[in-house]
Image (spheres, rainbow, N blue to C red):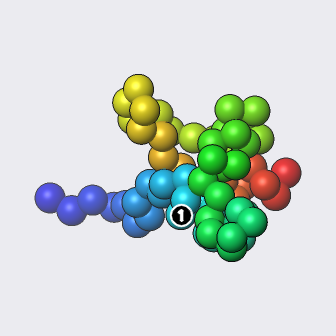
Amino acid sequence: MQMKNKQRREPLLTPAEIAARLQVLDKDGEPHGSKILQYAREGKIPSVRLGAKCIRFDWEAVERALIK
């Protein structure tokens, strides 16, 4: 059975990976994942909660949110 129109999706990203892509860096020049988590709590970017302490991000959804 073939699946038509199956979109290839990127894996969900960690807060640090999103920070690196957006160049949100701390004072030492490292990706600032906690700032990304803050943006998610404030509703500025969408997130996916996979468990009590596991939050990931869909890059395409984050891009769309930031373009608005």
Q: Within the image, what quadrant is residue 63 found in?
A: bottom right
46 and 29: which one is in front?
Answer: 29
x and y percent of residue 37 in the render? Answer: 63, 42
Q: Which picture quadrant has residue 64?
A: bottom right
Give me the residue at 14% from left, 58% from top. Answer: 1
Residue under the image location 57 percent in, 41 percent down: 47
Task: Find residue 32 and report its horizontal and vertical position in percent.
Answer: 65, 58
Establish if 20 lies above or below 68.
below
| 2 left or right, relative to 67 | left
Classify mark 1: residues with Cα within 10 Å, few (<14), some (14-19) or many (20+).
some
User: Which of these two is toward me, 61 or 3?
Assistant: 61
Q: What residue type is labelled 1?
A: Glu
> 68 and 49: which one is in front?
49
Could you tell whether 50 is left or right of 65 in the image?
left
Q: Residue lying farthest left?
A: 1
Q: In which quarter of the image is residue 45?
A: top right
Q: Can residue 22 be seen in this view?
A: no
Image position of 45 with respect to 7: above or below? above
Q: Residue at x 38, y 30 (%)?
A: 51
**Residue where numbered disc 1 is placed:** 17
- Spot occupied by residue 43 in the image (x, y as percentages of width and height): 73, 34
**Which of these two is toward me, 66 or 41?**
41
